Amino acid sequence: MIFEMTVQVRVPDFDKGQLWYQTLLNREPDFVPHGGFAEWELIPGCWLQVAEGEPAKDSGPLRLGVIDIESERARLKKELSVENFDIYSREEVPVKWGTFNDPWGNRLGFFEYLNKKERDERIKAVLG
């Protein structure tokens, strides 16, 4: 039985990486067990780990659900100088999405449910 998960991204400059991810996530880490390693619990049982090291090549993207993808894109462009963050949609797909890179090449992204009722039902199912 799987009951929890972690996803790890690596950054060669941990201090800059931690600050970048703090800005991305709008908060301090939830757990810093030792130097060169920090964790954020994104939703119950789902952790993002930032670790000092060389980024994995050709992995990802790790996409995170957001309420408003356009406002998040604008925030990331302003606060983190994120470039190349185009937003896509397709008629048969219930979300719009976009992918971008952190400064070290880790592929990340956001998605937004098009149907607000479906979004609210997912939020309630995940967060209670």
Image (tube, rainbow, N blue to C red):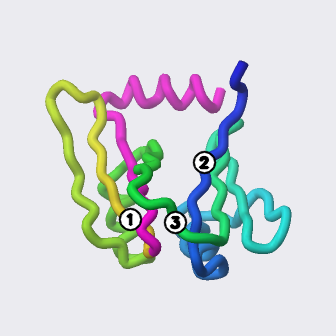
Relative to 15, 111 lies left or right: left
Q: Quadrant of the C terminus?
A: top right
Asked whether the residues under the numbered discs 3 and 2 touch, taking CB atoms below 8 Å apart as contact, a structural biologist would say no
| Rendered position, 16 above or below 122 | below
Q: Classify mark 3: helix, strand or loop.
A: loop
The crowding category of the residue bearing disc 2, from other C-alpha atoms within 10 Å (few below 14, some 14 to 19, many at least 20), is: few
| 40 versus 1 height, above or below | below
Q: Position of residue 75 (x, y in %)?
A: 40, 68
Q: At numbered mark 1, what does the secondary structure look like: helix, strand or loop?
A: strand
Numbered disc in front, either 3 or 2: 3
Task: Check the image and name the residue furthest to the right.
Answer: 33
The quarter of the picture where the N terminus appears is top right
Q: How many marks?
A: 3
Residue 90: give x, y in percent of width and height. 16, 34
Say which element carries label 2: strand
* Residue 44 visible: no
> Residue at the spot x=35%, y=35% of the render?
113
Q: Residue under circle 1? A: 101
The magenta span reads 104-128
Q: Nearer the viewer, mark 3 or mark 1?
A: 3
Task: Locate residue 8, reporting x and y percent.
Answer: 61, 54
- The residue that label 3 is drawn on is 55
Residue type indicated by callout 2:
Val
Q: Do the numbered discs 3 and 1 sit on residues whose CB atoms are within 8 Å?
A: no
Q: Residue at x 66, y 81 (%)?
A: 15
Residue that label 2 marks: 7
Q: The residue under label 1 is which amino acid type?
A: Asn
At x 20% / y 46%, what residue is drawn?
88
